[in-house]
Image (cartoon, rainbow, N blue to C red):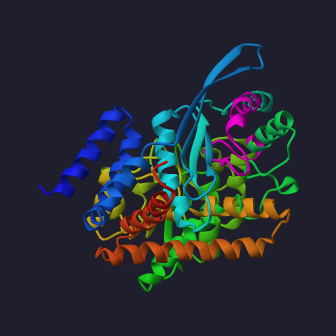
């Protein structure tokens, strides 16, 4: 074994020793490590930089006490992992979900580092959240939780320090409650959160950005293969913000979105969702906050499959837009058998490493999350820029910036993969391009 190989093996062993049991975080690190091996072999100085990068600059864990509508005290756990400030203020969303733990938040913050780097905007990386579940909670209870959560979080954030945003179960309602509490405590109106309402500092296209951006990324990949979106049948998982706007943009580009799902099952429109039907899904999920199965009462053509995943439906393209590890190797094999030629990740790390290997063996186009779903944080960065200018750009301006950024992300990922003789391995290229910008900045800024 060469000295470089020994050093790589030693770093991997140290990471596993230091963070035993953090499965999601270690999975994310392993996926990137494999891609960066050609970089390490060509220039071993980057091995030590990577070892520094995987250790968060700061990990904050705190108690979140609040009182429910019955007058009963509840206690949740809050997190903020500030991963890297090499490129700018920490930037990344907040997730409220029962599955949230330190491993999940660290994996998300780690992925965010590469994603934010790829956008070319000056943003560091962080992620946060809580194991609080807003489902079936009243607006008052959600407000009480958000106010308690921000009462601790406000000490650690700021427009030039750390700018959180939304993620799973943190939408406009939650961002409003969080912002209001920050303003009350700090006596300061500044851009400390993104995803805000348009009337008080938000950006046009922000709710649509992750879904739209994922489709723009897929469009660029298809163009690279001399194909177009026209007529492509697309299976989508999830039914939240990302899935909704993925479907909307697919429809606008001539593709045919045919599924939505949630944790209970999926709904299929055999002839594809129309804009009116997508709008109804938005009402069900964003306003009524009910299960996707309720959609069948609206559509005579819809079919609902309880306890199933949409990957069993024959299609051309797949857009996993729900949550991490929703596609395992068996699911990937099913997708491939059903004719899927491209998988573009709207969610964060929705494919296991085994699923990714299956895509590659079958020559399936693969848009990894850190590249394909970077549209959300890209427009968050644009919201920060608008807040700094005290201006609001037009919808057309923001959408034009988003489309350009997603094209640049695809091109930089492709160029990096080709530079290291990896052909058009966009997954490896995205990891390499994102890493090198952060790593070179860390070298310039010294051992800090």
Q: Residue furthest front?
A: 446
> Which stretch did the figure color magenta?
146-174
Which residue is at 62% across, 75% downward?
A: 403
309 horizontally vs 389: left or right: left
258 horizontally vs 362: left or right: right
Q: Is residue 239 above or below residue 139?
A: below
Pick the front one: 438 or 399: 438
- Look at the image and tell me whether residue 30 can be seen: yes
Quadrant of the rendered image containing residue 121: bottom right
Pick the front one: 224 or 379: 379
Counting every numbered tag in the picture gives 0
Residue 369: percent from left, percent from top: 48, 59
Residue 313: percent from left, percent from top: 43, 59
Q: Is residue 377 above or below residue 397?
A: above
Residue 43: percent from left, percent from top: 30, 65
Confirm whether the magenta stretch covers residue 155: yes
Which residue is at 53% across, 34% downward?
A: 100
Confirm whether the magenta stretch covers residue 319: no
- Look at the image and tell me whether residue 320 can be seen: no
Q: Is residue 317 above or below residue 151?
A: below
Which residue is at 54% across, 76% downward?
A: 408
Q: Residue furthest bottom?
A: 226
Q: Residue furthest left?
A: 1
Residue 176: percent from left, percent from top: 80, 43
Quadrant of the rendered image containing residue 427: bottom left
Quadrant of the rendered image containing residue 157: top right
For the N terminus, which image quadrant?
Answer: bottom left
């Amino acid at each position: 074994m060469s000295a470089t190989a020994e050093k790589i093996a030693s770093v991997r062993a140290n990471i596993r020793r230091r963070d035993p049991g953090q499965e999601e975080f270690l999975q994310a690190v392993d996926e990137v490590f494999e891609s960066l091996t050609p970089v390490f072999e060509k220039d071993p100085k980057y091995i030590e930089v990577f070892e520094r990068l995987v250790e968060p600059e700061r990990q904050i864990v705190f108690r979140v006490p609040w009182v429910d509508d019955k007058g009963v005290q509840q206690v949740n756990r809050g997190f903020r992992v500030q991963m890297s400030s090499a490129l700018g203020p920490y930037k990344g969303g907040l997730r409220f979900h029962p599955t949230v733990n330190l491993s999940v938040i660290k994996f998300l913050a780690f992925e965010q580092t590469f994603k934010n780097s790829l956008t070319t905007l000056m943003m560091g990386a962080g992620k946060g959240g809580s194991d609080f579940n807003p489902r079936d909670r009243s607006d008052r209870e959600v407000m009480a939780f958000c106010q308690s959560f921000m009462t601790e979080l406000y000490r650690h954030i700021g427009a030039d320090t750390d700018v959180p945003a939304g993620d799973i179960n943190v939408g406009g309602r939650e961002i409003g409650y969080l912002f209001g509490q920050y303003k009350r405590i700090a006596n300061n109106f500044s851009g400390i959160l993104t995803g805000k309402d348009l009337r008080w500092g938000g950006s046009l296209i922000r709710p649509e950005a992750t879904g739209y951006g994922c489709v723009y990324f897929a469009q660029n990949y298809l163009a690279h293969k001399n194909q177009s979106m026209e007529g492509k049948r697309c299976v989508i998982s999830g039914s939240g913000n990302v899935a909704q706007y993925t479907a909307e943009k697919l429809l606008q580009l001539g593709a045919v979105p045919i599924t939505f799902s949630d944790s209970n099952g999926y709904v299929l429109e055999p002839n594809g969702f129309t804009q009116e039907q997508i709008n109804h899904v938005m009402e069900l999920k964003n306003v009524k906050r009910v299960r996707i199965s309720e959609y069948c009462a609206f559509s005579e053509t819809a079919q609902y499959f309880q306890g199933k995943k949409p990957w069993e439906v024959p299609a051309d393209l797949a857009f996993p837009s729900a949550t991490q590890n929703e596609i395992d190797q068996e699911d990937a094999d099913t997708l491939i058998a059903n004719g899927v030629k491209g998988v573009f990740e709207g969610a964060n790390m929705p494919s296991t490493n085994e699923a990714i290997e299956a895509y590659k063996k079958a020559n399936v186009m693969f848009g990894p999350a850190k590249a394909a779903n970077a549209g959300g944080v890209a427009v968050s960065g644009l919201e920060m820029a608008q807040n700094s200018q005290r201006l609001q750009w037009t919808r057309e301006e923001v959408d034009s910036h988003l489309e350009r950024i997603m094209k640049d992300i695809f091109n930089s990922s492709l160029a990096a993969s080709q530079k290291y003789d990896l052909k058009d391995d966009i997954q490896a290229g995205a990891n390499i391009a994102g890493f090198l910008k952060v790593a070179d900045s860390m070298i310039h800024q010294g051992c800090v």
